[in-house]
Amino acid sequence: MASSDIDPLDCMDEDPRDYRAFKDSVHDFIKFDSFICKIIDTPQFQRLRYLKQLGVSYFVFPSASHNRFEHCLGSDAIDRDDPLGTGYLARKLVLHLQQRQPSLGINDRDIQCVTIAGLCHDLGHGPFSHVFDNYVIPAIRGPRPDGTHWCHEEASEMMLDSLVRENDIPLSEDRIAFIKDLIRGEPRLSAGHNPPEKQFLFEIVANKRNGIDVDKWDYIARDTKAIGEGCTLVTSRLIEAARVVRDTIAYNWKDAQSVYELVYSRYSLHKRFYNHKTAKAIEHMIVDVLVEADPVYHIGASIDDPSRYLYMTDSILEDVERSMDPRLEKARAIMKDLRKRILPKRVEEKCLPWQYKKLWQDKLTPKAVADMSVKRRQEKRASKRLRPGRALGIIPEEGPEAMERTQSLSGDLLPATQVPSLSQDTEMDTDAETVVDEEILTENDVIIDFCMLHFGMKEKDPLEYVGFYGKESFQNFIRPDVSGHLRPQHFQELILRCYTRDESKKDAVQDAFREVLKTLPDLTHSTPPPQAVVFDTAKGPPRTPANPPRELQPESSMSPAQFPNQFLNRNQSPPKSKKRQRDESPAVELGSKASKRRVVSD
């Protein structure tokens, strides 16, 4: 056979037609085989190109423009240049475990299902991601009869079914059920599989035990890079250290600090970027737009219809702006304000122990603040009424004689029958009444935002639920505290924010908000002693935490009435000594109008 008849591809160890390469900002060149590319090249997966990974944070951090498309690729990349055949994150981790621990019995079916689960775990995200889950759908549809709420994982399962059915992807029902459970992080549909599915595989994509999974590995590295922050997370070290011990993924005890930095990085990103005060203000505007647009675009109904949900992306905002439908007039007005940066203004912000959310959420509402404003208005109206002397038509003159004359007309000196009545017919100070009327609030003027920040497991310490092994005790677990003791005492906090949609009412909202706080209950100091996590070195960390490892206690004995002043002014100097206070002139009281202008953040 002539040399010209030889196919050049036959001389290669790997047929380039079997894979495609993608240039990724985090993992550099990554490659996918032809079967995975069939999933990527579908309308259901390509939809992820039009969902911002950080949702509304892009309005605040311009470089955070990456999408869920590349995040899902990164969660599941295959590096064929690696001589061991392992890849990034989901596939790389499962292949690493297969190679290092052949006794686990990891087979090709396991590898394929874990790979697809990593690829498709975010198929169900809606416009602006978690805003859609947490605010839009609850506002449109409310809770189910059983009290549960819709979540995007349900839509991921729906869109996966649609992807497989409409694109002729050769996956059996058995594997589809397994993939759905891997996305959820727990065996449900595959619970009756024979033989039983390997429990540790459910900890790779969505780890319900401790939150350490490849999803976080990718988005922490990707988000920090996009925002311009440094990232100390080294996923290759964690993958190399990963072992399966007693059916759970464990890490070398020397890497406990790396695991801690992972969960701390998650908390730090949420506090500094994902829940930035301006991003949260924009979130509420977008929620208002989508709720107003529901009658036109049937947003609430789309979560049950994959053909509609396919086009439910961030571009819905542009659809609203382009529409001439008169039903969208209010939504278009909100969008115009958003484009012109006319946003809700933060009135006050406080960082509190996490228990205050449950204690206050039903009591601290926009309606409560508006009602308090009415009450305050009535009080101001009463305080601004004319004195009896003016009600009788006597206009006091200036000077001591006028003061003495006014006192003689007061109720203290006149008989009760001669004291003028302060009824509704009594003449009012016109200027004072005008001032009071300007401070009238409605429920729509106020936004109350409860934002919970934690390390991934709410009030629990994630490291208490991570297995660590040592060189001398590979079959037993080591408590995480052997690697260090400098860890936080608390792992969850509440960021409480109050906004107003009308900047001219900022002072009135702040005044009413603070007054409502004074009426709210405080945390009790009779909480039972904390119960420590039961950590058996033979059995390992608890699979289903029954009790928090620590009960948070209030860090001071302040009453709720003192919280506003304590937490509002971030630039406030430390308290002065009594002697120094006597030597200096009195400070402006925090509740005064002058002080309001000084301490309120924009």
Image: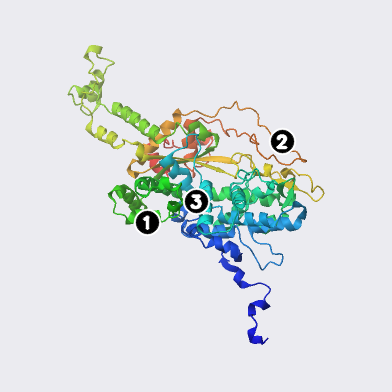
Q: Mark 3 falls on what kind of element?
A: loop
Q: Nearer the viewer, mark 3 or mark 1?
A: 3
Mark 3 and mark 1: Cα distance apart in space = 18 Å
Local crowd at mark 2 within 10 Å, few (<14), some, or many (≥20)?
few
Callout count:
3
- Which amino acid, mark 1? Glu
The numbered mark at residue 318 is 1
Q: Which of marks 2 and 3 is in front?
A: 3
Mark 3 or mark 1: whose residue is earlier in sequence: 3
Mark 1 and mark 2: Cα distance apart in space = 53 Å
Q: Mark 2 falls on what kind of element?
A: loop
Q: Nearer the viewer, residue 459 or 158?
A: 158
Local crowd at mark 3 within 10 Å, few (<14), some, or many (≥20)?
many
Q: Mark 2 points at which residue?
A: 534
Which residue is pictured at 26% across the width and 15% down the height?
Answer: 413
Which residue is pictured at 71% across the width and 58% down the height?
Answer: 96
- In which quarter of the view is residue 234 placed? bottom right
Q: Locate residue 469, reporting x and y percent.
A: 76, 48
